[in-house]
């Protein structure tokens, strides 16, 4: 995932990203530095791509949550995510 | 601005910012059902004899179902743990449910990794205790009855 354009589906990243927003995602930044708290990342789970924010990292496992915490299906529900599942970082909103 | 237009030429993929509507509909039944399935699949794996093509095929199919239902147990337990047993619910309970969830998830992983009837039954016991906690937290009575499945084991249901 060198550089991909994604359209956001769902409301869990509001107010940062709204439904139908387009974002650019790249794996390049993650080649030089591991994802850190506060990064918005795209990860793969259940054969789909999801976008969430890194809340914390413990022993190489990433706890990801949506910015719209009251309405987000995230690590609070499906648990932590491995580094391998994180495919890229959101660089900009188009 | 121009750069943005160029980027928009890139093929578009979908990324899910999944929401989770707090619908209030939770039930420990599915976790119990999935655990009975894991127990039944373990029984069937223990019953397989021989190593011919049919036996190998059966082992693959049964193991696949055992895997799927182990995942389902985990998924159902995580839903109950994170969505139902919220702080305000747990505060009113006599004891915290977290050790039971941990126990259930550990034995579930063990039952998944091998043909381990003891682990599968341990999972059922923990899942049933979680079900009892669930009903109690709602002010409802529950009871253990013999499940109508070939596992020959119990299931927790709401008492009428």
Image: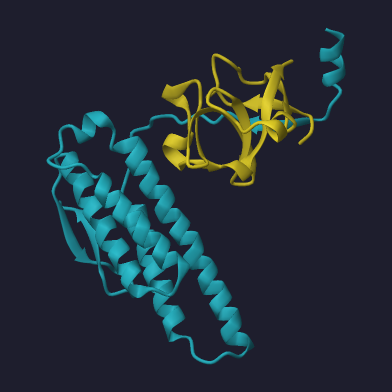
Residue at 70 percent of width and 16 percent of height: A93
Q: Answer with the quarter of the image where residue B139 lies.
A: top left
Please indicate whether residue B132 sits to the left or right of residue A57 in the image.
left
Residue A44, given in percent of the width and then of the height, sits at 63, 41
Please indicate whether residue A51 sits to the left or right of residue B95 in the image.
right
Q: Quadrant of the C terminus of chain A?
A: top right
Task: Answer above or below: position of B60 versus A57.
Answer: below
Task: Answer above or below: position of B80 versus B30.
Answer: above
Residue B24, given in percent of the width and then of the height, sits at 33, 33
Residue nearer the viewer, A85 or B129: A85
Residue A85, given in percent of the width and then of the height, sits at 61, 43
Residue at 54 percent of width and 14 percent of height: A15
Task: Answer above or below: position of A69 versus A48.
Answer: above
Residue A75, given in percent of the width and then of the height, sits at 47, 36
Residue B25 visible in this rendered orientation of the protein: no
Give the colour in which the image draws chain B. cyan
Please indicate whether residue B80 sits to the left or right of residue B12 in the image.
left
Q: Quadrant of the N terminus of chain A?
A: top right
Q: Which chain is yellow?
A: A
Colouring: by chain
Residue B18 visible in this rendered orientation of the protein: yes
């Amino acid at each position: 995932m060198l550089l991909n354009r994604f359209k956001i589906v769902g409301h869990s990243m509001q107010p940062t990203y709204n439904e139908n927003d387009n974002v650019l995602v790249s794996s390049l930044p993650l080649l030089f530095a591991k994802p850190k708290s506060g990064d918005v990342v795209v990860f793969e789970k259940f054969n789909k791509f999801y976008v969430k924010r890194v809340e914390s990292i413990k022993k190489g496992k990433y706890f990801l949550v949506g910015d719209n915490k009251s309405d987000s299906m995230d690590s609070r529900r499906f648990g932590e995510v491995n580094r391998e599942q994180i495919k890229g970082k959101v660089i900009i909103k188009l | 601005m121009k750069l943005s237009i160029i980027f928009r030429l890139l093929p578009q993929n979908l990324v899910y910012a999944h929401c989770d509507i707090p619908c209030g509909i939770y039930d420990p039944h599915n976790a119990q059902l999935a655990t009975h399935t894991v127990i039944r699949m373990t029984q069937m794996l223990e019953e397989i004899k021989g190593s011919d093509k049919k036996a190998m095929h059966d082992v693959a199919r049964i193991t696949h179902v055992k895997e799927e239902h182990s995942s389902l147990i985990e998924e159902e337990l995580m839903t109950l743990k994170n969505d139902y047993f919220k702080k305000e619910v747990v505060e009113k309970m006599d004891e915290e449910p977290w050790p039971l969830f941990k126990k259930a998830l550990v034995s579930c992983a063990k039952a998944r990794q091998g043909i381990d009837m003891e682990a599968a039954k341990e999972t059922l016991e923990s899942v049933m205790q979680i079900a009892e906690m669930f009903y109690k937290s709602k002010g409802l009575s529950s009871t253990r009855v013999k499940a109508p499945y070939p596992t020959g084991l119990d299931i927790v249901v709401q008492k009428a």
